[in-house]
């Protein structure tokens, strides 16, 4: 009898799926992982500085008062800048209102500091993504580290809050679109720069100039014209219309120091390099790219910001401190990727360039604020800080307070705060007219004699000597009816007693 074989054929064994690639080799994940890590780093530095009284009324307190007003659907009137002072008359930054919903949910200066940390970190995404597409995973990590730990971003992340944080990711995404020749998308990303600060219209114009050179000429020229006309409209019309004193508040920074416009233009090539602090800053701006970004036409986008800074009469604009270089860092690293992408270097050359970028980044870190993370003093709360917290807690919510510069942002979320000193004693000595200096109106005065006051007094006189501040405290007691509530570790708290 024939038997029937009922055994079924064995199915072919499917190959086992390969294990997923680690996160650092996933092109879609790498940029966002870096953004998250950098956001935590920036926020750690910024928040800890605030807890240690290292933030200031000029500028964190000023911006908090503006955003607080927006959150209450009011004009951004900022008492720290002066009675009835609308901050849109200082710089043109209506895009700050975008932060109002977040502040309404969390009314705290920390809200602004975390928002700035997130914005600066977000800018790494298009930079690292472009580097990964053009040059591979190693380049993506190098560009992310170079940008994220760069001195320009570090200086901004650790200095209060500034509107330029809104511009950094906008420009970064614009640069990615330019590199991919998506011209209209690039313009869409860059156009809101006009609402961030009045000088950034010239950066928009530089975007337009680049598009005119590399892409559709009509779109480029229209964008350039819109940028220039937008900035001129803001500087010549909108800002003077809102500024209580009329005119452009910062026009004095770019005066014709050589007597005429022609002479100023003739001297400009030398003026941008002297004193030597300007040359050092110029080199340091492009150093994180091993100077290769200078070979990219994208470097054109850095010209407007570098131009007004280096020609300014304000010495703060020349150096590497504060937030002024943050907007330049995306340009530098986008330029680096552009140059390497066009050169198509072999693996050995590419490794050498990336190693140089990392080396420059590591060498510069200790000289700039991100190094504070590993400093012992950052994690130690001093008796002075504790004393300040105790005395500030005695001021009730909703009170009006005249506060020292470094105490002001500790109060702006819950009080109406003005700057102390506000009524110079013996005003003629400093060029003030006592007749136009109002008597103090705040219910409370809190003064810190130990905090460094390295800030420009609103009138332009700087610094305000400690002896003058002490004289005003005495005058507040003697003439204006204030009495000392408490003194502790150099901090004095006074309250105005009602007159009978």
Image: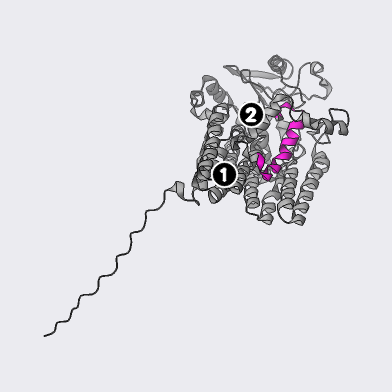
| Image location (x, y in percent) of residue 372 | 53, 28
What is the number of the mark on residue 305? none
| Image location (x, y in percent) of residue 205 | 75, 47
**Residue 475 visible (yes or no):** yes
Q: How crowded is mark 2: few (under 14 residues within 10 Å), some or many (20 or more)?
A: many
| Image location (x, y in percent) of residue 105 | 58, 44
| Disc 2 secondary structure class | loop
| Disc 1 secondary structure class | helix
Q: What stretch is highlighted in magenta?
A: 294-316
* Above or below 445: residue 218: below
Q: Please name whichever residue, 64 or 132, is drawn nearer the observer in this view of the structure.
A: 132
What is the number of the mark on residue 56? 2
Q: Mark 1 points at which residue?
A: 124
Helix, strand or loop for the magenta stretch, by majority: helix
**The image quarter in which residue 472 lies:** top right
Q: How crowded is mark 1: few (under 14 residues within 10 Å), some or many (20 or more)?
A: many
* Above or below 49: residue 225: below
- Which residue is at 58% across, 34% downward? 154
On whether residue 158 falls in the magenta region, the answer is: no
Q: How is the image coloured?
A: one colour
**Residue 399 visible (yes or no):** no
Q: Which quadrant, please, contains the C terminus?
A: top right
On whether residue 311 falls in the magenta region, the answer is: yes
Q: Residue furthest bottom?
A: 1
Q: Residue furthest left?
A: 1
Q: Please name whichever residue, 317 or 445, is drawn nearer the observer in this view of the structure.
A: 317
Number of numbered discs on residues: 2
Between marks 2 and 1 in the image, the one whose residue lies nearer the viewer: 1
Instruction: Say whether disc 2 or disc 1 marks the residue closer to the N-terminus.
Output: 2
- Which residue is at 68% across, 39% downward? 66
């Amino acid at each position: 009898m024939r038997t029937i074989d009922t055994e079924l054929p064995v199915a072919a064994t499917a190959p086992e799926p390969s294990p997923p690639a680690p996160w650092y080799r996933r092109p879609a994940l790498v940029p966002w992982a870096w953004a998250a890590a950098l956001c935590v780093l920036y926020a750690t530095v910024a928040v800890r500085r605030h807890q240690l009284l290292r933030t200031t009324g000029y500028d964190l307190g000023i911006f908090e008062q503006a955003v607080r007003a927006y959150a209450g659907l009011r004009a951004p009137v900022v008492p720290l800048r002066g009675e009835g002072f609308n901050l849109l008359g200082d710089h043109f930054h209506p895009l700050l209102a975008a932060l109002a919903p977040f502040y309404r949910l969390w009314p705290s200066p920390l809200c602004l500091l975390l928002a700035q940390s997130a914005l600066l970190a977000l800018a790494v995404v298009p930079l690292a993504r472009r580097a990964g597409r053009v040059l591979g995973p190693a380049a993506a990590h190098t560009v992310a580290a170079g940008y994220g730990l760069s001195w320009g971003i570090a200086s901004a992340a650790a200095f209060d809050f500034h509107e330029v944080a809104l511009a950094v990711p906008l420009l970064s995404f614009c640069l990615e679109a330019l590199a991919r020749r998506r011209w209209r998308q690039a313009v869409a990303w860059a156009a809101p720069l006009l609402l961030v600060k009045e000088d950034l219209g010239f950066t928009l114009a530089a975007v337009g100039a680049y598009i005119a050179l590399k892409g559709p000429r009509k779109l480029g020229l229209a964008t350039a014209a819109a940028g220039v006309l937008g900035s001129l409209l803001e500087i010549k019309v909108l800002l003077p219309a809102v500024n209580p004193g009329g005119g452009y508040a910062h026009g004095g920074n770019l005066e014709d120091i050589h007597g005429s416009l022609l002479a100023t233009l003739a001297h400009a090539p030398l003026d941008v390099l002297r004193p030597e602090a300007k040359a050092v800053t110029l080199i340091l701006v492009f150093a994180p790219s091993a100077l290769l970004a200078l070979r990219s036409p994208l470097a054109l986008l850095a010209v407007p910001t570098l131009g007004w800074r280096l020609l300014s009469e304000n010495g703060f604009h020349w150096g590497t401190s504060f937030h002024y270089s943050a907007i330049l860092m995306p340009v530098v690293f986008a330029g680096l990727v552009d140059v390497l992408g066009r050169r198509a270097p072999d693996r050995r050359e590419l490794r050498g360039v990336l190693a140089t970028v990392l080396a420059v980044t590591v060498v510069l870190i200790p000289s700039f604020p991100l190094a504070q993370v590993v400093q012992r003093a950052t994690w130690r709360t001093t008796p002075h800080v504790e004393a300040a917290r105790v005395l500030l807690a005695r001021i009730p919510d909703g009170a009006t307070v005249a506060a020292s510069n470094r105490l002001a942002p500790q109060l702006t979320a819950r009080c109406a705060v003005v700057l102390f000193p506000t009524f110079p004693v013996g005003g003629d000595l400093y060029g003030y007219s006592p007749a136009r200096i109002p008597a103090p109106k705040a219910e409370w005065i809190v003064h810190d004699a130990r905090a460094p006051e390295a800030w420009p007094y609103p009138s332009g006189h700087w610094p305000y000597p400690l002896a003058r501040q002490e004289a005003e405290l005495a005058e507040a007691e003697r003439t204006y009816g204030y009495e000392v509530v408490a003194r502790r570790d150099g901090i004095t708290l006074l309250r105005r007693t009602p007159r009978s």
